[in-house]
Amino acid sequence: AQSVAQPEDQVNVAEGNPLTVKCTYSVSGNPYLFWYVQYPNRGLQFLLKYITGDNLVKGSYGFEAEFNKSQTSFHLKKPSALVSDSALYFCAVRDPMEYGNKLVFGAGTILRVKS
Amino acid sequence: DSGVTQTPKHLITATGQRVTLRCSPRSGDLSVYWYQQSLDQGLQFLIQYYNGEERAKGNILERFSAQQFPDLHSELNLSSLELGDSALYFCASTGLAGGTGELFFGEGSRLTVL
């Protein structure tokens, strides 16, 4: 069964600095990987996904993520953080070999960007 | 706005009661997923329907059931409620075939069991 680990409960970064939110995954075959963001009392919003192709994926709001197959990682990055980026971030994986196509989510990482 | 509509947004009820949560997927999406979000369990997949049929089942309790109707809306029924069932319940939908599509989430239904 597929699984996702987000090793940091919280990441703190100063506004204007680069940010990284870490994610590692476990899946039997080639993974489909996703990042979502959740603001307080809101639903999850899709940021970006990796299906195949270029290992560097660009998404919404200036975020990008790098797929690294050898390290089974899919870290979320942004060159310059904004205070408005403060939110809860989820990494998710789908095993394309599994019937049903459900997404399995990590525990989430709180990102705090301070001005 | 994701296009996924969930009602009610908030629900407060007592232990032992039964509630129904409703979800309307994005127009044209055939797949509906239900997730439970709680502080201790995180985001847990409950169940998926595709065009009216159950497609996958996750950590869904026997006291919970769901269905998807011909108009593609879905309902999640929670019965014999316990304090531990208090959580945010999300519905999500997707329309792309082959599993490459992202899920679009509703705003959730917050259930409080007293």
Image: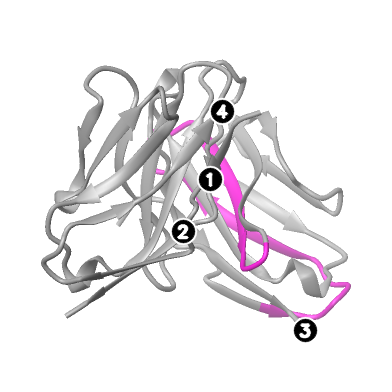
Tell me which amino acid carries mark 2: Glu
Q: Is residue B39 magenta?
A: yes
Q: Amino acid at mark 1?
A: Ala
Q: Which residue is mark 2?
A: A8
Q: Chain of mark 3?
A: B
Residue A30 x, y percent position in the rendering: 46, 17
Q: Quote the CA–CA distance across marks 3 and 4.
A: 35 Å
In space, the residues marked 1 and 3 are separated at their CA atoms by 33 Å
Indicate which disc, 3 or 4, sits on the residue closer to the N terminus. 4
Q: What distance separates the C-alpha of mark 2 from that of mark 4? A: 38 Å
Question: Are the numbered discs 3 and 2 placed on the same chain, yes or no?
Answer: no
Q: Which residues are magenta?
A: B12-40
Residue to which mark 4 is pinned:
B51
Report the amino acid beneath label 4.
Asn
Mark 2 neighbour density, 10 Å: few (under 14) some (14–19) many (20 or more): some
**Dot 4, how many residues are within 10 Å of its Cα: few (below 14), some (14-19), or many (20+)?**
some
Cα gap from disc 3 to disc 2, whole angstroms: 32 Å
The answer to which quarter of the image holds residue A15 is bottom left
Q: Residue at x 50, y 53 (%)?
A: A7
Task: Tell me the residue that label 3 is attached to.
Answer: B114
Asked if residue A48 lies left or right of residue B84, the reply is left
Position above or below: A108 against A115: above
